[in-house]
Image (cartoon, helix red, strand yellow):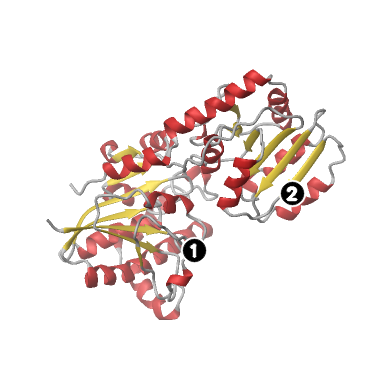
Amino acid sequence: MKKRVLIILNTKYPYDKSEDFLSNELDYVKGFDEVICFPILVYGEKTSESIIYKSTIQSVKFYNSPVSYKSKTRLIKLLFSVFNNAQTYRELTSLIATRRISLRNLKQLFSFLFIANNAMLDISKVIKQNYRNVDVILYSYWMHAGAFTAISLQKKLKKKVAIRKIITRCHRFDLYEYADSGQYLPMRNYIFSNIDEIHSISEDGLSYLKNKYKIDTGKVFLSRLGSLDRGISIFPKTVPLRLVSCSWLRPVKRVSSIVKAISDLPFQLEWVHFGDGEEFDEINELVKKITNPLITCKLMGACSNEKVLEEYKKNPYDVFINVSENEGVPVSIMEAISFGKIIIATDVGGTAEIVEDGINGFLLNKDFTIDELVRVLTKVALLDSQQFNEMCRQSRRIWEERCNADYNYAKFYSNLSFY
């Protein structure tokens, strides 16, 4: 039997803290003799000291492009690759036909193509030098430039390397075109036509793919992400009500809405937020303007995932809140319900698949008002101890059934065959 190799195309793992859940997932890989990660947005020489993630379970090799797609030494090659490809002109024609042609979308398209082709040039060399006489599966962690790269590699190397299958996951930014400011994600139909399997992390993503695009439904699968089991931490309901959130401070996360909603509450509440971002100063100024003596707020800034999870475990937070404008299936909510926290969240993306209204939390409409958020916060504050404890237990139950990494990732890799 030939050696079996899994090659994963991702963005920056293991050199940047941006793909925690890929790190967790890799500990469950089985059925392969070798696992390789190629972060397509990492450039230049790297050493073992450059690696942020240290896995003690799965041995993984790492390669990356020696030069950026913006490098003068690489641009000529990339320009030739992009403009000598008929698919580029088909995509431009599609942009015009769908009236989405704009400077912003053109920049997005060509950035996408340059990144993908840059990665393809370098990883094809790695594969030809090291993996000629093996069976290969190419796996793009995102249905974006990495997926296009995987398809390009298969076409380029089909007579030299046994690439048995190309697959991709899809999450949020790489799936929902309506969430993109230009209503455009490059090369959608090309990827759908040439990829072997698409693994959506949510039922909502599956429905979106099947309803919006002409796609072979036989190649689309539900493959949920999962979080690690760090135990249950259900504390008795407290006064004040303790509210916690964790996200980047960006407009799409709408954290300012939390500040506005809690400012004038007629009951005691403590709010702690983990995360930094472009809106940190703005949110901090809003917090400083709160004069209500019943309300206390603490912005923790950037924290490691490990620190946040340790906080959830040892501190009696009552409610986790996420009011984002769009989501895939929020990893932050998965982590919170694993500890048994009640959730307040917007009904966007696949959130309703892990937050059941009135069961383990409360769902808000995407375009909720501040008054509606106040009413939900008040409803949680008025829960008696029995109601509160039951909702906490339901959160843990839902996590065990739908978000447990041990089950979800083991299932994903057990179903991942070469044929």
Camera-nearest residue between 180 and 171 = 171
Residue 287 in view of the camera: yes
First of labels 1, 2 by sequence position: 1
Q: Position of residue 72 (x, y in %)?
A: 44, 80
In the image, taking residue 293 as reference, residue 330 lies left or right, namely left
Q: Is residue 218 above or below residue 155?
A: above
User: What residue is shown at x 36% (from left), y 35% (from top)?
Assistant: 210
Q: Is residue 173 above or below residue 7?
A: above
1 or 2: mark nearer the eye: 1
What numbered label is drawn on residue 52?
1
In terms of secondary structure, where does tag 2 sit? helix
Residue type beneath disc 2: Ile
Q: Position of residue 290 (x, y in %)?
A: 84, 42
Q: Which residue is mark 2?
A: 283
Camera-nearest residue between 354 and 200 = 354
Q: Are marks 1 and 2 in contact (CB under 8 Å)?
A: no
In terms of secondary structure, where does tag 1 sit? loop
